Image: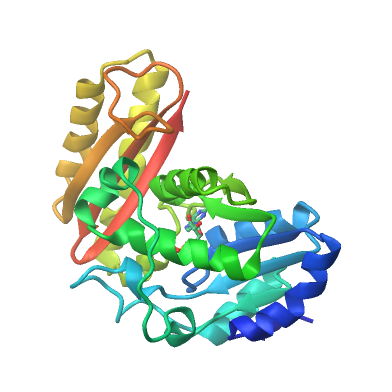
Amino acid sequence: MMRVVHTVAELHKILLPYWRKGDPIGFAPTMGALHDGHCSLLRQSRADHNALTIASIFVNPLQFGPGEDYDEYPRDLQNDVKIAREAGADLVFAPSVAEMYPRGFVTFVDMEKLTERLCGAHRPGHFKGVLTVVFKLFAVVRPNHAYFGQKDYQQSVIIQRMITDLNLDVKMHIMPIIREPDGLAMSSRNAYLGTKHRQEALVLHQALDRAKELIGGGEKNVKKLQAEVRRLIGAVKGAKLDYVSIVHPETLEDVNDVSGKTVVLVAARFGKTRLIDNVIVD
Ligand code: AMP
């Protein structure tokens, strides 16, 4: 039977025996509006023989900037619970905002450098919100294994950095990007897209595919690769590019040429919907 709990106290009661016995807990934090990308994380947790697989569903106000989509973000707990159960979750933790951030809350996890690049440059404070909520969720769940998606590549890098820097006893697993049949990376935000933008958004995956193909063919010149991705996305009327970056997989610093493992990342807006995608090349 799958359980849904809303408070840290309830969760503590259920988890105490697992912590005591050292039975492994697998955990996938989400903001809900679950899709197959989220399910892939829960399925992996089960496949890894965790004694308990937990999904959290929490639309974290701290990681939304002013004017972003906190209010519009899709929320449907009943449906999410059903999806999480089918994907193999044993427990859904769905706290309220007051449960996570009680009155008087003033402590945050912040990080330099890695959070200032890419999406951090376009969404000030975003990663501080992400790090703070993930740290808190790790503290209340105490997972042995945590599952994240490569879709949010920069997020996975900064969370791994936090785990290392703060000596958290969690093993991080980064799962491949799950896509729609036509290539669009699955995202809860895809629900915002009208027919026209939904079609136009395909260009992100197509442009990354093209970059990968060029790199596979021996192109190492970052400027040329960026120009090609920009050209493809620029040709789509509804797309407004935030960035196309070609970076080192761990430092997220721009590379001068593509040699060894490298990540190509894009972020673009289609109307008010901001989408991201990336590809790792080796
Ligand atoms: P979110 O609910 O958007 O905060 O995402 C929760 C987790 O699911 C994060 O670790 C995401 O990287 C992961 N995720 C989101 N979309 C995908 C996807 N298309 N494929 C794989 N993982 C994903």
Residue 20 against residue 57 in the figure, above or below: above
86 relative position to 186: left or right: right
Near-viewer residue (150 or 136): 136
Near-viewer residue (99 or 61): 99
Percent of width and height locating residue 91: 69, 76
Can you say which quadrant of the picture contains the N terminus? bottom right
Percent of width and height locating residue 209: 38, 34
Type of colouring: rainbow
Image quarter of residue 55 = bottom right
Near-viewer residue (102 or 144): 102
Residue 236 against residue 65 in the figure, above or below: above
Image quarter of residue 66 = bottom left
Residue 35: in sight, yes or no? no
144 relative position to 77: left or right: right
Tally of numbered tags: 0
Q: Residue at 25% x, 22% y: name it.
A: 222
Residue 140 against residue 125 in the figure, above or below: below
Near-viewer residue (208 or 194): 208
272 relative position to 48: left or right: left
Which residue is outermost to the top? 218
Percent of width and height locating residue 162: 48, 48
Q: Residue at 29% x, 69% y: name it.
A: 64
Q: Residue at 69% x, 54% y: name it.
A: 44
Residue 134: in sight, yes or no? yes
Q: Residue at 48% x, 75% y: name it.
A: 58
Percent of width and height locating residue 47: 76, 53
